[in-house]
Amino acid sequence: MFEIYYQSKIPTIGWDFYITIAITFSLAFFFFFLKRLYEDKLKLSNLMDFRLLFSLVFLYFLTEIYSYYELFETIERIESGELVSVEGIIKELDISSYSSRSESFKVGKVSFDYNDVVTSGLFFANRAHDSKVIKEGNRVKISYLPKEDDNLIFEIKVFKPNVKQ
């Protein structure tokens, strides 16, 4: 019998997404008003050129919107049934810690490689380092999302034998 050890939670669209969109469009729409306010009313033009400041802030919000786009794209792939499952024994476990912790292992012919800093919070990255589940020889069933060279772990079930007394 398999018992769920880890299962990702699919996030919903929060108010922060809509605020980011609203701020980005407001910045673009009110560019000239903000420039006049910055230079004439606040007299801050001698501290930093408005175009540079505006570009940096606008670029930040565009980057935020792009990260939401990537998240929505990933959620769509998950909900459309692109998750794949593999069942077997964990082998070739390799754990390395430099500035962050990385782990890699195989189940059957499928390789998994993740990092507790770089891997998206939507997927498993063994951020609880005292885990006894990701261990050589453990039997697991893993649902994952293939993405380029990575297999992003969405769910891990560990085999628990039925022990009757």
Image (cartoon, rainbow, N blue to C red):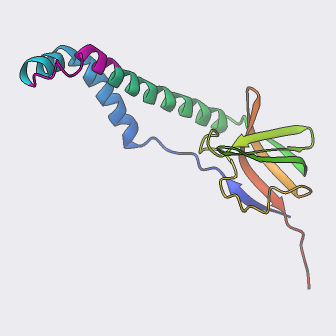
The residue at 82%/59% (across/down) is 158
96 left or right of 119? Answer: right
Asked whether 49 or 6 is in front, the reply is 49
- In the rendered image, which quarter contains the N terminus? bottom right
Q: Is residue 151 above or below residue 30?
A: below
Q: Which residue range is magenta in the image?
A: 42-55
The residue positioned 59% from the left and 36% from the top of the image is 75
Residue 128, percent across and down? 67, 58
Q: Position of residue 30 (x, y in %)?
A: 20, 19
Residue 84 rendering spot, x and y as whole percentages: 79, 39
Vertical comparison of 24 with 11: above or below: above
Q: Which quadrant is home to the C terminus?
A: bottom right
Task: Name the side, left or right, on which 48 lies relative to 55.
Answer: left
Of residue 11 and residue 24, the one placed in the foreground of this image is 24
Q: Is residue 18 above or below residue 11?
A: above
Depth order, front residue of 145/27: 27
Q: Which residue: 49% across, 44% down?
A: 12
Q: Residue at x 58, y 29 (%)?
A: 73
* Left/right of residue 139 with respect to residue 81 in the rendered view: right
Q: Quadrant of residue 21?
A: top left
Residue nearest the viewer, comparing 10 with 63 = 63
Residue 66 inside the magenta-drawn segment: no
Residue 121: x percent and y percent?
A: 59, 45
Q: How many marks?
A: 0
